[in-house]
Structure formats: C-alpha cells, structure tokens
C-alpha cells in the first residue's frame, strides 16, 4: 500500500473550510483505492503573519521539502496590505520550489451552469499552461517622486529562455497526449522583446513535435475567442500575467471560481508541487458554509493523479461532478447544503458516480508524471 506524505496549508478565510471538505474526500478515496496519506498541517497565512510577522521562512522551506505534495486552501485578509502575502509567501513558494507550471483545466462539465449562451461541454475542454515563476510577477519595480504629481513608477518583467522553454516543452508534451494542438497566447505586437522570446522558443521546439499543430493568439483576442469559441483551443501556453487573467475568464466559463482547480508543478521532482482551488479567501463569507468546495476537491484529485493514484483521482472527479450537477446553485445558500455537506456527499458517491466523458486532466497529470515531464517527489 502506497503512503503519500502531503503538507496541508488551510490558510485564511474559507480556506480551512474547503480544505476540510477535501480532506474528507481524500480519506474516503484512500480507503476505497488502497493508499494512505501522512498529513502535516501547516500554520501559515494572514493569521500567522499578523501574530508573528512570519511569511515564507527557511525553516518552512525545509519542512515542506520533505513532502510529496502540498495542498493549499487560500490566503488573504483585509488586515494585511495587498501584495504582502502574495509576494511574501505564495510567489516565494513557487520560486523556491521551482513550480514552473501553473496548470489550469477549463472544462465545462455536463449539467453545470455557464453564463455563455448555448455552450456545451463538448465545446469546452482545454488546459491553460501558465508560466509560474517569471514575468511581471517577479520583476522588480521602483517609484520616484512618490506622492507628488511627478511620480514615476517602473515595473519590470523578467523572461528567460530557460524559464520559457521548460513550460513550452511541457505544453508540447501535453498537447501530444491530448488533441495535438498548441496555442501561444501573448502580445508580441506590443511587447516586442518578451513576445519574440516566447515565439522563437515555440518555433524552435515545434521541430521536435511535428505531430502538434501550432498557432498564436494575441491575449486581447483570446479574451474574445475563449468565451465564444473555446473549442478552438486544446493546450494554451502563456506568460505569468496573461495566464492569471485568462484562466480566471476560463473559470467563469466553466461555472465560476468555486469549481475551478489548479496545479503548480515542479517539473523535475526536485521539490513538491502544490495544488489549490483558484478562488481567494473570501473573508466576507468565511464561517457561513457558503463556499463551494468542489474546486478544492478537484485540486486534491489533481494531486492524487500527480502522485500516481489515477483511478482514485478519476473517481473523485466523477463524484464531484455528479454532486455539482445536482446542486440548485453553485455557491452561497443556493447550493442547498453547506460546504461540509457537499464534501461529505462527494465522499459518499466515490466509485458510484458515472465516469466523466472525454479525456480528463487527471489522465494528463498521470501520464505526465509517468513520462517524467512533471515528476512527483519520490
């Protein structure tokens, strides 16, 4: 029987609620599919920062490196200045653990409401590969004459060939596993230097993958095409900032932030990967039981697929989707049950719900891990 050592960071706001629901599903999956988990609960986030002033520390880095993966809830609190937690903890972890890829499936499941008129699940099944350790999010900035009418702010964006190449290569491999199409999303007509680096990298690597069709879409055009014609895309690769924006758009298309999952992947197994729902801490609804835990549950399933538990991951996805389609609403009191209730219902349906049709991101992660292009810790 396999044992997976997983660090759990519940965080702030609704983070502990959705994590608690997902851990119940994880425990049920272990019983059903014959694996165990060794969980370490980590106190980190706004609460700890306000008490101790600590964010990402050398001791925490060392502690987390001993785990196979990290499950993450959410971070944020109005009492903490915006940017402190994001840069001081979340970006710090992505950089320290070289979680180069942020993998975001955009899949409309049957029976799930979408704001896009006449959109069907058959037309919406893609993955977005967001570069996760460079770009505008790690560049330095400076301001002179702050607080005056003459203030000047400069914000840098950092793009390296090595950083771009590793996510582009991963994207080509992913496209080979899926429908064989890769789209680069950037703004190369304005961001000339960065755009050229990205396009040159895609062109150079395309020679290694002659079976993958390649195209390009400006990020502003993507914001038009993605809602009205998501079937145009299979694997989309993009930079850190553009990826942050278009994946949230994708989440809305597939039913909202509460049902969207993500993986932050270390590609060589040198450090743990991290898995999280894409929503924030939502402090205004914390403690009310209104948060939809499906995004966290599907992120947990992605974690298991990454760790080699493909069948368990697929069963969790199927159960979560089956519960999701039966909810009268996707969040708040309209869900018809509270956060914990949704988690318990998913756990009860494990192994009973009909399989999700089409290729799953769980298959993608499992295949990538086996191929060594997104290797789990061992």
Image (cartoon, rainbow, N blue to C red):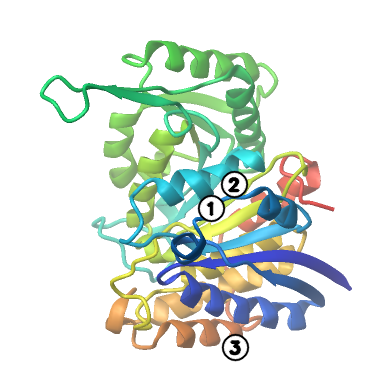
- Looking at the picture, does residue 160 appear above or below residue 336? above
- Looking at the picture, does residue 187 appear above or below residue 109? above
Q: Position of residue 34 (x, y in %)?
A: 82, 77
User: Extreme front residue here?
Assistant: 52
Residue 64: quadrant of the picture = bottom right
Query: In the rendered view, does 50 fall on the left or right side of 63?
Result: left
Dot 3 alpha-carbon crowd within 10 angstroms: few under 14, some 14 to 19, many 20 or more: some
Q: Position of residue 182 (x, y in %)?
A: 53, 31
Dot 1 alpha-carbon crowd within 10 angstroms: few under 14, some 14 to 19, many 20 or more: many
Sequence-wise first label, 1 or 3? 1
Q: Residue at x 72, y 45 (%)?
A: 368
Q: Is residue 191 visible?
A: yes
Q: Position of residue 89 (x, y in %)?
A: 52, 49
Residue position marked by numbered label 1 in the rendering: 55
Sequence-wise first label, 2 or 1? 1
Seen from the viewer's position, the closer of residues 112 and 78 is 78
Q: Secondary structure at mark 1?
A: loop
State the CA–CA distance, disc 3 to disc 2.
34 Å
Q: Are marks 2 and 1 in contact (CB under 8 Å)?
A: no
Q: Residue at x 39, y 34 (%)?
A: 242
Q: Quadrant of the N terminus?
A: bottom right
**Mark drawn on residue 93:** 2
**Mark drawn on residue 286:** none
Residue position marked by numbered label 3 in the rendering: 348
Q: State how many labels appear.
A: 3
- Looking at the picture, does residue 322 appear above or below residue 302? below
Q: Residue at x 68, y 48 (%)?
A: 58
């Amino acid at each position: 029987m396999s044992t997976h050592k997983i660090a759990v960071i519940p965080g702030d706001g609704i983070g502990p609620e959705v994590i608690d629901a997902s851990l119940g599903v994880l425990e049920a999956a272990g019983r059903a599919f014959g694996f165990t988990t060794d969980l370490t609960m980590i106190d980190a986030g706004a609460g700890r920062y306000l008490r101790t002033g600590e964010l990402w520390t050398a001791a925490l880095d060392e502690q987390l490196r001993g785990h196979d993966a990290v499950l993450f809830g959410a971070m944020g609190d109005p009492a903490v200045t915006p940017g402190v937690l994001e840069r001081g903890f979340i970006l710090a972890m992505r950089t320290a653990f070289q979680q180069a890829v942020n993998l975001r499936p955009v899949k409309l499941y049957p029976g799930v409401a979408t704001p896009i008129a006449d959109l069907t699940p058959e037309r919406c099944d893609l993955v977005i590969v967001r570069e996760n350790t460079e770009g505008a999010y790690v560049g330095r900035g400076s301001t002179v004459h702050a607080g005056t009418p003459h203030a000047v702010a400069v914000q840098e964006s950092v793009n390296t060939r090595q950083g771009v190449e590793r996510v582009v290569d991963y994207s080509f491999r992913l496209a080979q596993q899926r429908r064989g199409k890769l789209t680069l999303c950037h703004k190369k007509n304005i961001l000339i230097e960065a755009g050229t680096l990205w396009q040159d990298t895609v062109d150079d690597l395309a020679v290694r993958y002659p079976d993958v069709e390649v195209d390009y879409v400006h990020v502003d055009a993507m914001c038009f095409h993605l809602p009205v014609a998501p079937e145009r895309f299979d694997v989309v690769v993009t930079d850190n900032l553009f990826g942050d924006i278009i994946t949230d758009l994708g989440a809305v298309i597939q039913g909202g932030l509460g049902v969207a999952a993500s993986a932050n992947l270390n590609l060589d197994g040198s450090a743990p990967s991290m898995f999280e729902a894409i929503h924030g801490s939502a402090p205004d609804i914390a403690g009310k039981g209104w948060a939809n835990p499906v995004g966290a549950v599907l992120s947990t399933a992605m974690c298991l697929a990454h760790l080699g538990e493909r069948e368990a991951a697929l069963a969790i996805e199927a159960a979560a989707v089956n519960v999701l389609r039966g909810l009268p609403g996707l969040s708040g009191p309209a869900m018809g049950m509270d956060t914990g209730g949704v988690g318990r219902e998913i756990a009860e349906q494990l192994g009973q719900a009909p399989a999700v049709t089409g290729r799953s991101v769980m298959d993608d992660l499992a295949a990538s891990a086996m191929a060594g292009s997104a290797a789990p810790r061992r």
